[in-house]
Amino acid sequence: MSIFVYDDGDWAETLRLVDSTSPYALTGAVFAKDIRAIREALDTLKNSAGNFYINDKPTGAVVGQQPFGGGRASGTNDKAGSMMNLLRWVSARSIKETFVPAVDYRYPFMDEE
């Protein structure tokens, strides 16, 4: 585990450093009270960890309750141990069925004014 104490003024640069330092992306964590700092970390580090923890240890995945899987050189981010893993092996399809027949297929925004 690596721990780095950064200067508050270097937060954005620290995030870029974390994002670009390793080819691996299994888990990551950020501890902060400032919601803006958390949001910036989530945005900048979106590809830096398959599982990302906020104010929690990065070893906190509960088997069978939380999807788990790394990205980059840590894996294919399949999220083993969850239904999400099945999406890698199927072609997802959404089907909608309406039981009340439509009387008009036009959309109001398409009406000429």
Image: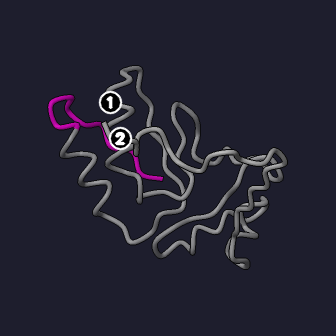
Q: Viewed as shown, does residue 81 lie left or right of 29?
A: right
User: At 67% across and 44% down in the image, what residue appears?
Assistant: 60
**How crowded is the residue under tag 1: few (<14 C-alpha within 10 Å), some, or many (20+)?**
some
User: At 83% across and 52% down in the image, what residue appears?
Assistant: 64
Task: Measuring from the top left, give residue 87's x and y in whole percent.
Answer: 70, 69
Q: Name the residue under label 2.
A: 41
Task: Measuring from the top left, give residue 97's x and y in whole percent.
Answer: 79, 55
Q: Viewed as shown, does residue 54 lie left or right of 2?
A: right
User: At 54% across and 58% down in the image, what residue appears?
Assistant: 50
Residues at discs 2 and 1 in contact (Cβ within 8 Å): yes
Q: Mark 1 points at which residue?
A: 37
**How crowded is the residue under tag 2: few (<14 C-alpha within 10 Å), some, or many (20+)?**
many
Quarter of the view holding residue 78: bottom right
Instruction: Determine the main secondary structure of the stretch shown in magenta.
Output: loop
Q: Quadrant of the C terminus?
A: top left
Q: Viewed as shown, does residue 76 lie left or right of 68?
A: left
Which element is circle 1 on?
helix
Q: Does 97 appear above or below 93?
A: above
Q: Does 27 appear above or below 4?
A: below
Q: What stretch is highlighted in magenta?
A: 1-11
Task: Measuring from the top left, give residue 99's x and y in whole percent.
Answer: 84, 48
Tag 2: amino acid: Ala
Q: Does 11 appear above or below 82?
A: above
Q: Does the magenta stretch include residue 7?
A: yes
Q: How far apart are labels 2 and 1 at the CA level?
A: 6 Å
